[in-house]
Image: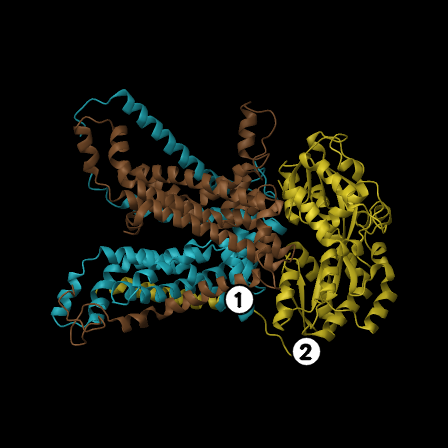
Amino acid sequence: MSSTRAHDAKGATRSSGWHPHLGPWQGLLFAAPVLAAIAFFVVYPLVQLFIQAFSDGAGLERFAEVFTNPVSVRALTTTIVDSLIVALIAVLAGGLIAWTLHATTRRWLRVLTWIALLIPFTMGTIVKNYSILLLLVANGPINSALLGLGVIDQPLQLLYTPIAVVYGIAYSLLPYAGLTLFSVFSHVDHNLIASAKVLGATRMTALRTVIFPIVRGGMLTTAALIFVLSLGFYVTPVLLGGLRSPFLATVINQQIFTLYDFPGASATAIVVLLIALVALGAAILAGGRNAGRQMLR
Amino acid sequence: MRNIRPLATIGALSVALIAMTGCAGGSDAGSDSAAGGDDKLVIASWGGAFTEATRTNLAEPFEEETGIKVEIVDVPGTQVTQMQQMVDAGDVQWDVMDSLGAADAFYMYQEGLIQELPAELATSLTETLGEEKMSEFGFTFANLGYVIACNNASGKECPDSLEGFFDPAAFPGNREIPGEYYSQLAAALVAASGQDTMSDDIDLDAALAQLSQVEPATTVWYTSGDQQEQVLRQGEADFGLIYSGRAYNLVDEGLDIEVNWSGVYDPGYTAIATDAPHQAAAEKFMQWVAEHPEAQAGFAEDMSYGVPNAEALEVMPKEAAERLADYPANFEKLVQQNFTWYLANKDAIDNGIRNIVQGG
Amino acid sequence: MATQPVRPSERVFSILTGIAIGAIIVIVLAPAVLAVVLSFSTDSAISFPPKNWGFDRYVDFFTSPQWTDPLFLSIRLGLMSALLALIVGLATLIAVHRSRLPFRGGIETLSLVSLVLPVSAYAVAMFVVYSATGLRGTEIGIIMMYAMLGLPMVVLIGGTAIRQLNGDVELVANVLGASKFRAWGGLTFPMLAPAFIAAFAAAFQLAFEEAVFIDFLGGPGLKTLPKAISDSVRYGSDPVITAIAATLVIITTVFVAIPLGVARGRKHD
């Protein structure tokens, strides 16, 4: 829009030119609140974390501790592995839901699917995790049903296992996966499938060879997003995983409220952040910037 | 301009709702710490039924008698971290710490978060309650026993001793064990390994070996009070080493629970916070509680937790007294915790237990 | 629409995906249904299957201050923080989409950071900051934190909507003499109203059910509904929480099902 503006030596536009958008200084004024927020709520806390982790003249010992202490190591591997599984499940299930919403013609199915998609979002963190807990306990509905049907003769230990944690986190993140993928899929032209079918492809082949390459980037980015969100989960691992399936969040919780080791908690928190950063970096490299655009639109 | 209306309506509605809930909502955040004085008292307690029992049996009668307004704040499990913050910031908002966990209490005293009792108060309290109920910083309150509670509906044989509890070969069954209460668990392990908990020369490795032995048979490592009840109620474990009060809750609910007092004595300590804003009121409260066995008895009946004044046991009905950790027949079966040993070896003990419970 | 006969493999594919969708819906709805079922029990403790039935828990929920106080607090904090998020978000959107500020793309990305930061790590960091600045345990502190968490919603949803607008409308208004702000106020933002409403709702929802930061950053006077529920689960399971769960589920279902059910079907049916 502004390519005809005359530029002076520094590249700034001459003030006599009109532009439909605000100038840089006015823009700065409007950006001031968010910049202040970022300074106080993002930069400052991160700096403080590092200060705490290196406090009392410690070098990298506290960070080394995170990777050597058996409790910490177990939590680290559990967190990463479980989060990968969650990302996979969320993208598959979310993708299925998003595609259904995108393609189905039955209204009742669409309403039901929307409800299913949004309920984890609105149920509230503690409440939904506690409901899942009640579902999984030894004398809860699932075990009672299985016992009644004769499939098992001893109640299964479902609570305080990785299964419970993965279920809980995937449950919470499903709306995010579903909505993001819905946005990605909404750019897919329905005619593409119809054209493929006319040319003789089955629905499966059409999906595989035509649709999938288009949405692959978006799905990868969504998976990365879910992975990163899952890494930091706090309530679910504590409530559903207990001490047997600890996440790094469980360890951080202990370090603050039981061991009163604040610097240690800061070091662990930084490790979590670094893993998240690496994951996001990898996703951006793999998916490319287009994937991000697809999601934002 | 027509489309502005939806936005404007939302805006107006929001403001109205905010105003409404602002008026309806009770307490504002933070506090209004009146300068020094004894017109008010702030007690930091455990919330739920515990706070209710404190309010009904202690706070309200105290308020009636002295005219001092009592406010109870619920801070279950975060007393230490919050006190740390408040002392660092120079803005302590609590006066009395209600029934701190013993290990926490000794730790807080070591860190300067709770006061040494003023000499006069200490003398007077010791006179009323006896030395065994006192420490440098307060008197024992809401004492409980970590008891062996068995759900007979599970059909498993109930262990009759700590040794048996930690021996899955002798007593098969799923257990629930404290996951984060290291001092109490350590005492249980020491006893299970056949050692004297109060000796000067405890073999930590032998104690920890007991934990490794029982680990495969443990389905729940609990981290909170209510979880202990939930686990037995929901069948996640067959028996557990849990708070006596919680065990009796289950009994009262109608579950077939057997309670075995061969466990660990776990006192709570009521103490005064460092830099308490209402020092005089706090001291008055401690004195009042010590001198009122009926008030203590009421609390003990409600919560099934022990209280320091010996007369309290006589004032309450026998069935209620029999549920208390301080009841002589129960007390003699419980092993005592060695807090000096625990604090001196805190890191080794904490990490030793953690590695077994949460490690590879 | 199909001009060819349906092949068997297609059928199988359809059935499998149908089953998969069905399974997903069941798995997602199960905890919600359980909560609703349990909310109508009157047993003294939460257990399955319920032995007695009644509305007791709902009555307890809506009549005891123990629960209504946290409810009102959560509503108030939610509204205020969502409003703050909306205001800051609006300013940010102007800076990013309607100005020539350098690095405005980067600013947009940065404003989304609080959504992606791992909660457990972020809460610890904010704990340190708030303790150092004395904001811990204050209402304004919580409101600001929640607004920060809601900001990405405004920027994301609002940003998406703005990108889809045709900027020519504003140009026309400008040509006809309207100032930038007049054009935006009178044309752009009203067109974005639905997006802003959705963003406000999302930010409110986030603040209303937020359960981690309130643990770390809250204090005695700040018992929000999630905090009250959390304390209940840990220290004294009040069965009322099932009624709370059920209420939220029912509200969602009603608010989602009605508009969707009533709206017209899509074009490509």
Task: Determine whether the residue tagged by mark 2 lies in a helix, strand or loop.
Answer: loop
What is the number of the mark on residue B36? 2
What is the number of the mark on residue C130? 1
Q: Position of residue A136 (x, y in %)?
A: 55, 37
Q: Position of residue A258 (x, y in %)?
A: 65, 54
Circle 1 crowding by C-alpha within 10 Å: few under 14, some 14–19, many from 20: many
Which quadrant holds the N terminus of chain C? top left
Name the chain letter of the residue that bears numbered label 2.
Answer: B
Q: In the picture shown, does residue A44 fall above or below B349?
A: below
Give the colour scheme of this rendering: by chain
Query: Which residue is rendered at x = 43% and y = 52% of the image?
Result: A277
Look at chain B in the picture and name its colour: yellow
Query: Which residue is rendered at x = 50% and y = 49% of the image?
Result: A233
Chain the render paints cyan: C
Q: Position of residue A56 (x, y in %)?
A: 62, 64
Dot in front, 2 or 1:
1
Kind of residue at disc 1: Tyr
How far is disc 2 from disc 1 in space, using C-alphas? 26 Å
Q: Position of residue A57 (x, y in %)?
A: 61, 64
Quarter holding residue B55 = bottom right
Query: Which residue is rendered at x = 17% and y = 65% of the image?
Result: C170
Residue C36 seen from this side: no
Query: Which residue is rendered at x = 57% and y = 61% of the image?
Result: A54
Task: Determine whether the residue tagged by mark 1 lies in a helix, strand or loop.
Answer: helix
User: In front here: C38 or A42?
Assistant: A42
Circle 2 crowding by C-alpha within 10 Å: few under 14, some 14–19, many from 20: some
Indicate left or right for B75 with A146 as reference.
right
Kind of residue at disc 2: Gly
Indicate left or right for A270 with B94 as reference.
left
Residue A126 seen from this side: yes
Chain the render paints brown: A
